[in-house]
Amino acid sequence: MIVGLIGFGKVSQNLFKLIKSKDMEFITSFEGRSGETIEAIKKSGIEVLDTFEDVASASDILISATSPKSALDVALKYGKYAKGIYLDLNNISPDTTLEIDKHVSNLVDGAIIGKIDSDNPILYLSGKNSDGLLFLNDFITTKKISDNVGDAARLKLLRSAYTKTLSALLIESHQIAKTCNLEDEFFDALTLTEGNDFKEKSLSRINNTLNSSKRKSEELEEIIDYFDNNDLTMVRAALKKLNR
Amino acid sequence: MIVGLIGFGKVSQNLFKLIKSKDMEFITSFEGRSGETIEAIKKSGIEVLDTFEDVASASDILISATSPKSALDVALKYGKYAKGIYLDLNNISPDTTLEIDKHVSNLVDGAIIGKIDSDNPILYLSGKNSDGLLFLNDFITTKKISDNVGDAARLKLLRSAYTKTLSALLIESHQIAKTCNLEDEFFDALTLTEGNDFKEKSLSRINNTLNSSKRKSEELEEIIDYFDNNDLTMVRAALKKLNR
């Protein structure tokens, strides 16, 4: 089975490490790649074709893992050459996924939950052709959601709405606890119900959110746009909180 | 050591079970008690005095565990007879605790975190006289916060602000997930970071909150009143959410 990679960042590199086996042949191209990426590809030993058009044509599974911004461009440019499954792993909105679906046959919408380089990432898939990728479960926990392209992207957005709003709540609670001079006790008293790693996990979430609050705000805005038909009292409050 | 109990509800009954030992003698009174409570006291075998004035006078530790509404009345009525430690275990606001402190010598402010009849409740104490109660750690996990009466009540309020706001977030996220037809996947995808019991715990929180949303709203209003000097964007959103 031939797996073509468009994009050779963290996701592709780690997928390659996870999935490589004697039955799988990986291909990619240097076309338009940075020196750094070319070095990484050379080091990996993956077979290199001249163009991504060649990669797309030759692949049983074509994986697009570039960036949310370029996902649609990549699909428009190379999707038409893909004869097998086209797996989009860019962190894109459900709307972009549906747009890509108009131009690509055999699209599978993928979302990796958890860090790809952690012990236990999960690959969620949606779309009719997901069944053809369930064998990946031998290498990375792989779950099919449904036949509806867009469900994997929606799930990622749902999860993100929850975790980002939770971070806003943690920021607020932690601030009040500090004002009361009860910071340690706050974490301690919640450990009972929230788990032994509550303090460590919470402080990490608080710091991550505060250190990239502009980006998190933008992501919350996208979430609010997408789920606009719902009551978003808590998510909107989180956005307001981050914008302070 | 003589421990006097004012109030013989769930907290007192369970504390009695947890703490009883050959060095401890428990006393209480039938004064003004309901038939049901009198039966429970008879069954427990606790020594019964004529009046709570007698109980207060005879106790090394007097425990008030009645109800938030009657905590101040009980303190005003019997606090003056207490010669030992007066431990208030009613779920009262920090302001009420400070009010009680004006009328009671040797007040210790106590907050039980976790269910008293669970495996692992924690008894938090604050106030200068807390040291005299640290021996309770032999029977129930007991932690002194500080010498400041009111800190235990504040900690309970802080914890409650967090858990109630979290419940509002869970209600909102769960609702959106249901609208997307991704309810199971939502819980599944969050289990990775939120713990294996995330679904069960979340559904229990959602149901508890929805089933007593009026009371939870009132508690959130008290929390907002008390922490009013802080940025309460998330907590206020939770109140708004519950009032829908």
Image: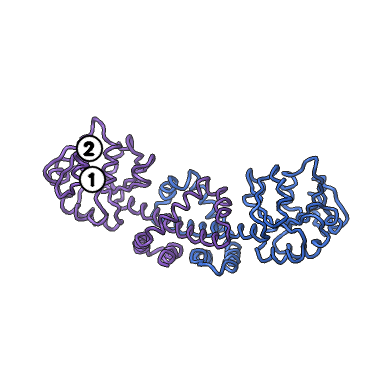
Chain colours: A purple, B blue
What residue sits right under mark 1 in the picture? A8
**In the image: residue B59, left or right of residue B184:** right
Relative depth, front residue between A170 and A2: A170
Q: Is residue B14 above or below residue B168?
A: above
Which amino acid type is marked by label 2? Answer: Ser
- Callout 2: chain: A
The residue carrying pointer 1 sits among few (fewer than 14), some (14 to 19) or many (20 or more) residues within 10 Å by Cα, namely: many
Mark 1 touches mark 2? (CB < 8 Å): yes
| Percent coordinates x, y for residue B128 in the rendering | 71, 57
Which amino acid type is marked by label 1? Answer: Phe
- Distance Cα–Cα, label 1 vs label 2: 10 Å
| Percent coordinates x, y for residue A189 in the rendering | 58, 52
**In the image: residue B90, left or right of residue B206:** right
The label on residue A61 is none
What residue sits right under mark 2 in the picture? A44
**In the image: residue A58, left or right of residue A207:** left
| Percent coordinates x, y for residue A229 in the rendering | 38, 64
Label 1: which secondary element:
loop
Question: Hey, which residue is sitting farthest left in the picture?
Answer: A50
The answer to which quarter of the image holds residue A76 is bottom left
The structure residue drawn at horizontal position 35% and vertical position 54%, both measured from the top left corner, is A154
Q: Is residue A44 above or below residue B191?
A: above
